[in-house]
């Protein structure tokens, strides 16, 4: 009997021994969790809603709302609260107020804020939104002033067919002169091998799309000849990381996704790596089980925002800290 128990325990002990010998980066859930603080201006999205906080998370603004209206619950009271689009003091517990928009049909994909950019003076936010109720199957480039009264509708610059490819990341950047540089997944007609559209939008009295091209053409030729992007420098190719973000000081963060195999199971591990723009050398900071994305750098240049599970957390790349909660939703831009 003792020999049988020993025989059963041996394989388990062997697996544990081999797993212990396999060096793994520390978990992003280990270490000391510290409170996350907002500095600068940060934009993020909850389903269909664009938010902005400028230095104070408790005074966040709801800039745009394309979420389907919630049906009011039955109540014997004859009075009902009027629709409101005023800023919520607590975006982590915000409840969307019923509006006049009809709910989408089950076959219609919900609207989503795909990307956003903040101007240097924090007075303008430009964003890409897909599948808005009046433009299903489209992606639209829009902007709004942070100084507009609550409820002001964003201004549309351009809309086009939305490929809806979640593997291609949309981007929006407001350039120093106010032009809006963006990229988005696109269905080209006639079909081409290219899948990403790059364009430049203009605000003002007559908002318009000033330039457009495929991503490949933009990298090779257009960025050097478009007058609207004069002075814009393409990001370096190295280091090559998934969901790569670059801080103003040249720091880089991104993901290395590893397949971890053991005698018991196979799983993917998202390793958060740090490096410098232009250099292939990176250092693994920590690892997280399940899908995560590095989405933006904080203004300090050493804290990175990481989106996972419908929320965004922050990680200090230089300290032995765990991921700390920031906001419910996905951070899209963080501007000093």
Image (cartoon, rainbow, N blue to C red):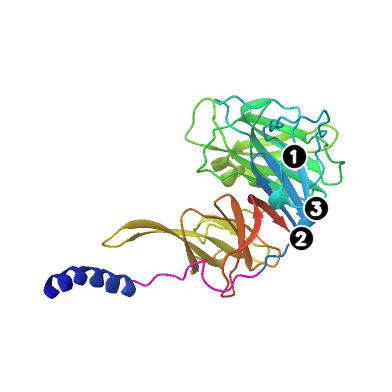
Which residue is depicted at the point 77% across and 38% down?
202
Q: Which residue is mark 1?
A: 64
Asked whether the beta carbons under mark 2 and mark 1 sit within 8 Å of each other, the answer is no
Instruction: Name the chief secondary structure element in magenta.
Output: loop
Instruction: Name the residue rendered at 68%, 65% in the picture.
Output: 36
Residue range (magenta): 22-34
Left or right of 66 in this view: 89: right
Q: CA distance from mark 3 to mark 2?
A: 9 Å
Is residue 173 visible in the rendered image? The answer is: no
Ranked by sequence position, the earlier of labels 3 and 2 is 2
Q: Which residue is mark 3?
A: 122
Most foreground residue, 188 or 93: 93
In this picture, residue 261 sits left or right of residue 130: left
Residue designated by label 2: 40
26 is higher (above) or lower (below) than 211: below
Left or right, 5 with respect to 125, comes to left
């Amino acid at each position: 009997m003792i020999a049988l128990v020993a025989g059963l325990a041996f394989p388990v002990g062997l697996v544990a021994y081999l797993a212990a010998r396999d060096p793994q980066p520390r978990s992003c859930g280990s270490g000391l969790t510290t409170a996350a603080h907002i500095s600068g201006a940060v934009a993020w999205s909850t389903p269909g809603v664009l938010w902005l906080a400028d230095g104070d998370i408790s005074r966040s603004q709801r800039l745009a709302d394309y979420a389907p209206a919630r049906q009011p619950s039955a109540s014997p009271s004859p009075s009902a609260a009027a629709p409101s689009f005023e800023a919520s003091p607590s975006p982590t517990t915000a409840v969307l107020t019923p509006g006049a928009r009809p709910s989408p049909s089950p076959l219609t994909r919900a609207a989503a804020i795909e990307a956003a950019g903040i101007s240097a003076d924090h007075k303008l936010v430009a964003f890409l939104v897909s599948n808005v109720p009046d433009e299903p199957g489209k992606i639209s480039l829009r902007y709004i002033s942070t100084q507009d009264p609550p409820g002001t509708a964003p201004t549309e610059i351009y809309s086009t067919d939305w490929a809806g490819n979640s593997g291609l990341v949309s981007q929006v950047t407001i350039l120093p002169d106010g032009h809006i540089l963006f990229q988005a997944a696109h269905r080209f007609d006639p079909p081409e091998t290219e899948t990403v559209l790059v364009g430049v939008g203009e605000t003002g009295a007559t908002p318009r799309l000033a330039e457009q091209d495929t991503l490949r053409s933009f990298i090779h030729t257009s960025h050097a000849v478009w007058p609207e992007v004069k002075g814009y420098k393409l990001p370096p190719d190295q280091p090559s990381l998934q969901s790569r973000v670059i801080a103003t000081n040249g720091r880089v963060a991104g993901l290395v996704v590893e397949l971890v195999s053991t005698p018991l199971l196979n799983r993917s591990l998202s390793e958060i790596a740090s490096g410098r723009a232009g250099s292939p050398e990176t250092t693994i900071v920590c690892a997280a089980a399940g899908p995560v994305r590095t989405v933006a750098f904080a203004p300090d240049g050493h804290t990175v925002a990481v989106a996972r599970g419908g929320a965004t957390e922050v990680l200090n790349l230089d300290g032995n800290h765990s991921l700390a909660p920031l906001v419910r939703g996905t951070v899209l831009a963080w501007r000093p």
